Amino acid sequence: MPLSDLTITPLADDIAFGNRVAGLGWHNINDEDTRAQLRQLFIERGVLVFENMEPTPKMQLELSKVFGPLKDHPTKNVPRASGDMLGVIDMHSRPREDLGHDHGLTIFNGRKVYSFLPWHFDHSYNDELNYAGVLRAVIAAPVDGRTGFADGIDIYNKMDAGVRAKIENINAIYTLDVRLTQMRFGRYFQSFGDLEHERANTKEAEVFPRAIHPMIWQRPTGEKVAHFCGFSAVGLENHEDPAGEALFEEALQEMYRAITPYWHKWNTTDMLIWDNHRVLHAVEGCDPKYERQMHRTTIKGDYNLGRFEHGKKIGEVQREVAPLLLPA
Ligand SMILES: [Fe+2]
């Protein structure tokens, strides 16, 4: 069956990746031809925004499974939903009106915001990446709160060839310490004290090995992808020296210059999937007085180019880390 009952349109005129998809529901989501064609469209376009979806965890899980099996999260300090939402990660920012302090807030674009996240890919601190994620806004902020997406193929093509050549065979090093206050490279925001759950993660980070990922990789379909970020990164492999630090900063600044982002303003009936091997994402944040709740699923499927330092494997790491995280 062709995608005749789906309407596929570009995300925006000036965006070289992604599509909007309207017309998917229970009546056609289990049709094998439709599923196969959605998978192919996703490989080609990197981001799909499904509009007018039934806003339930059941539909989000079913949509996710079109693209691959679900994956559990590699760290312990991420809230899991349960029951019929098994496999859904809950990211909930409650209103913060009585602050009295600025912990967790960020100044970005001249505004003080909450829930900000700089450009990154998920699971950078792990040896294995997830293939994709499906995001849904259960509660959308009325103003701001958009999620940004930027295509690594587009970035690669637009980056200065001289800078690109310098990082073509270089790997970046990432850690589980994802506190914004600690981000060393490519900062384009101002952050204040850490939140409690961000500090909790640092205990696990102390015993979690560092992960290594290539800054540029080539897809089986031939395209090269610029795929690195300053978030959770600590430097370049074999170049943890001033020259390496300068190169990392230069590459990040050139990447920011080359980015043509798509910023998604959320409706609660949207579901958005992005290819985590290819597409970077960011959260612009919103006024702390607003509540924001996002549900995300994680879809398994690695690009097989990441690894832990010293050849460790995730099973071994989890066995070593788990006893150290037991409450005292
Ligand atoms: Fe993320």
Image (spheres, rainbow, N blue to C red):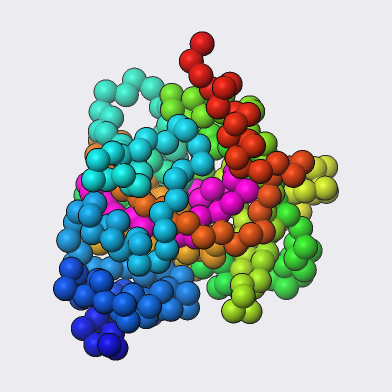
- 1 inside magenta stretch: no
Residue 140 appears anywhere in the view: no
Side of 53 relative to 65 (left or right): left
Q: Position of residue 202 (x, y in %)?
A: 56, 27
Residue drawn at x 47%, y 74% is 43
Q: Quadrant of residue 219 in the image?
A: bottom right
Q: Quadrant of the N terminus?
A: bottom left
User: On screen, 178 above or below 64?
Assistant: above
Q: Nearer the viewer, residue 188 or 60?
A: 60
Q: Position of residue 180 (x, y in %)?
A: 53, 37
Q: Nearer the viewer, residue 160 or 5?
A: 5
Residue 305 appears anywhere in the view: yes
Q: Position of residue 283 (x, y in %)?
A: 41, 50
User: Magenta residues, as a range?
Assistant: 118-140
User: On screen, 7 above or below 201?
Assistant: below
Q: Quadrant of residue 99 in the image?
A: top left
Q: Position of residue 114 (x, y in %)?
A: 37, 38
User: On screen, 233 above or below 135?
Assistant: above
Q: Nearer the viewer, residue 147 or 106?
A: 147
